[in-house]
């Protein structure tokens, strides 16, 4: 039986449908290590957007500023993408958030006995996905 026939395409398309809507925002080349950014991302993953923005705004961590900017961009993308005019921030939650490694800045520093030691200044790519229905 060939699944590419016209009568089977309807079933395949129904399987691929997603009921909840999502929006994504990416910030690239943040000059901070991904490990330090992940500490804050673990705190806000799966929470409501309103609570997460409040938490990030009053956090003293350096990464909080970049995460807050990316999160507000993701919410803005969600609002632009949605057809519903009365979408509120209360109904949106953070579905996924992760920090990946980015290219290192390779620097050198003087070491003892006339040698040099290498410094890798790490940077990160930040991705946040927001959705409207919690599963």
Image (cartoon, grey):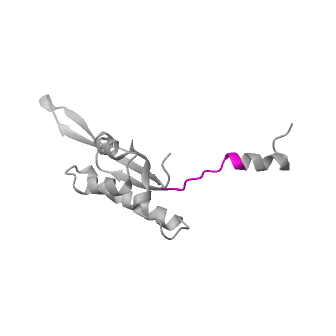
Left or right of 71, for residue 107: left
Tell me the residue at 26%/43% (across/down). Answer: 107
Residue 56 lies, in percent from the top left, at: 27, 53
User: Can you say which quadrant of the picture contains the N terminus?
Assistant: top right
- Check if residue 16 falls in the magenta segment: yes
Q: Nearer the viewer, residue 101 or 57?
A: 57
Residue 119 lies, in percent from the top left, at: 25, 38
Tell me the residue at 53%/65% (across/down). Answer: 82
Left or right of 33, for residue 111: left
* Quadrant position of residue 26: bottom left
User: Which residue is outermost to the bottom?
Assistant: 85
Magenta-drawn stretch, dominant element (helix, strand or loop):
loop
Q: What's drawn in magenta, residue-wise?
A: 14-23
Residue 63 lies, in percent from the top left, at: 27, 50
- Check if residue 20 falls in the magenta segment: yes
Residue 88 lies, in percent from the top left, at: 43, 64
Q: Nearer the viewer, residue 19 or 126?
A: 19
Q: Nearer the viewer, residue 16 or 31?
A: 16
Tell me the residue at 39%/48% (across/down). Answer: 125
């Amino acid at each position: 039986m060939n699944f590419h026939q016209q009568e089977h395409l309807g079933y395949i398309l129904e399987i691929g449908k997603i009921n909840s809507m999502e929006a994504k925002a990416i910030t690239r080349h943040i000059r901070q290590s991904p490990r330090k950014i992940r500490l804050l991302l673990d705190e806000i993953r799966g929470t409501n957007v309103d609570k997460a923005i409040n938490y990030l705004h009053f956090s003293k961590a350096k990464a909080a500023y970049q995460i807050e900017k990316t999160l507000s961009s993701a919410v803005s993308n969600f609002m632009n993408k949605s057809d519903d005019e009365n979408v509120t921030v209360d109904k949106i939650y953070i579905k996924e958030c992760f920090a990946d490694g980015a290219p290192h800045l390779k620097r050198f520093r003087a070491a003892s006995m006339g040698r040099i030691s290498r410094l890798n200044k790490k940077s990160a790519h930040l991705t946040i996905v927001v959705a409207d229905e919690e599963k």
